[in-house]
Image (cartoon, rainbow, N blue to C red):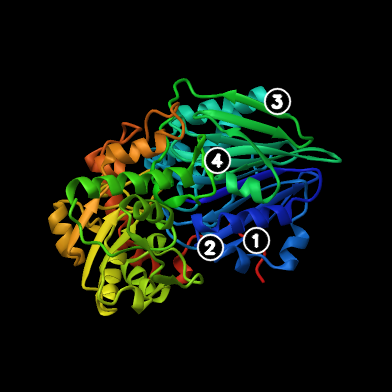
Amino acid sequence: MCGIVGIVGKRDVNVQLYDALTILQHRGQDAAGIVTCQDGRMAQQKANGLVQDVFRTRHMQRLLGNMGIGHVRYPTAGSSGPAMAQPFYVNSPYGIALAHNGNLTNTEKLSEDLFKTDLRHVNTDSDSEVLLNVFAHELQLQGKLKPTPDDIFKAISGVHNRISGGYAVVSLIAGYGLIAFRDPNGIRPLVYGTRETEDGTEYMVASESVALDVLGFHLIDDVEPGEAIFVTEEGQLHRRQCAKHSRLAPCIFEHVYFARPDSIMDGISVYKARLRQGEKLADKILRERPEHDIDVVIPIPDSSRVAGQALAQRLGVKFREGLVKNRYIGRTFIMPGQQQRKKSVRQKLNPIELEFKGKNVLLVDDSIVRGTTCQQIIQMARDAGARKVYFASAAPAVKYPNVYGIDMPTTTELIAHGRTDEEVCKEIGADWLIYQDLADLIAASTEGNHKVTEFDCAVFTGEYIGGDVTKEYLEKLAAARNDSAKAGKKSGKASEAPMGLHNGAMG
């Protein structure tokens, strides 16, 4: 899960890209980067850290040009470090920069093919660098000094034929324009829009529609599964379906947790979807515990607030903000390493004692993944004087790894894997626990757009949309990307890190 943005404007787009990345900061807090293009020359700045830390005035002064792309990173595939910050760049053919949201599932084979057949060298363990080189090779096969839109779309068709997984991509070709495309299953989100100016029409693509809204762009549409958009440097738009077979099966976790509630994805309002999640969860409580003794509903901020409000209203129970969030602590779920996540929960949330003391409290969260957050918050509630602590999850039990762009690489880190609901309840220390039914979760989203008939729900079911995820693949993934493996990479000497061939100027 990362955030991507691309703009083709009539004036310098550096500040707009910066603003868009700050809006998408919730999608990744590990690293950020921007590449712009002016007169066929690219300029870039990228580094580890939040958007506000990566870019300074001196960087913005050299990020010139009327088109550019940006990226905020959350480390999934590949280790965390400055050499892995995006966008990536290759100089042949033409000069191409690329930023990617998602995970490829056949990276190992692609890397081998790139080396043995395409004669290309990949310098990091990032699947995004692999994707860039595949795209570059497919463009090179066209053999054109000046590629046409047809050439570019043909190259993207070649990319779709070679790679598997979930991906939404923005790319720049120096002197030509901006390309955006989405995987044939539409797993990872991508939208585009326009803005009318005195000088003409400007175009923008982004992971979420909220980035378009804040910058004054009008949302036109989602990039369809398998579709590619090419906007020339002069501002001409070309669209084409580039996949032989496509289906719309977006990741439902976007509606549960990832996306901002003020975004619209695949025609579905995330806010309304979360309202319906809360209502359906309340209905389940009324069915299973009609004689409940809940005094107050308290959401775990921020992503469960909308569902919690709807749930409380449906139950006819008081809704209170009993947990105050420190907004300067990042999203704990996407922090690399269990120890860091555990420490940050206490730093991030503090209970208001009077909302807990002597009451039967229903805590509402968007989901239970590793159990770190809910264990500690339940204990906080008891320490604050709660008589009983109940827990409700707006999503079903997360039991399986998600390989398409969410850092849930191994089942051993998922508290619900191999456990019953009662065992999870005991593990987190709640008096009772209730999960959303999967059918209700899907219904909460499809009610927003009946044209969307299926979702990627692999984290709940273990059924992977791509159809290429095997037990052996999951075992390899777990070994490479669990917390222990990440800790080992972090402890390595700096001198052993991959060369930052594409990093911006230091200082």
Task: State which tag comes first along the sequence, 1 or 4.
Answer: 4
Q: Quadrant of the C terminus?
A: bottom right
Question: Looking at the image, do the residues carrying marks 2 and 3 touch, with CB atoms under 8 Å apart?
Answer: no
Question: In the displayed structure, would residue 151 be above or below residue 10?
Answer: above
Mark 2 residue type: Pro
Across and down, in percent, residue 127 comes to 45, 46
Across and down, in percent, residue 90 comes to 61, 45
Name the residue beneath numbered marker 2: 82
Q: Pointer 1: residues within 10 angstroms few (<14), some, or many (20+)? A: some
Mark 3 residue type: Thr
Name the residue beneath numbered marker 4: 169
Task: State which tag comes first along the sequence, 1 or 3.
Answer: 3
Name the residue beneath numbered marker 1: 504
Task: State which tag comes first along the sequence, 2 or 3.
Answer: 2
Across and down, in percent, residue 87 comes to 59, 51
- Tell me the CA gap for discs 1 and 3: 30 Å
Question: In the displayed structure, would residue 422 be above or below residue 322?
Answer: above
Q: Single out the residue that lies furthest toward the right.
A: 198
Q: Nearer the viewer, residue 437 or 65?
A: 437
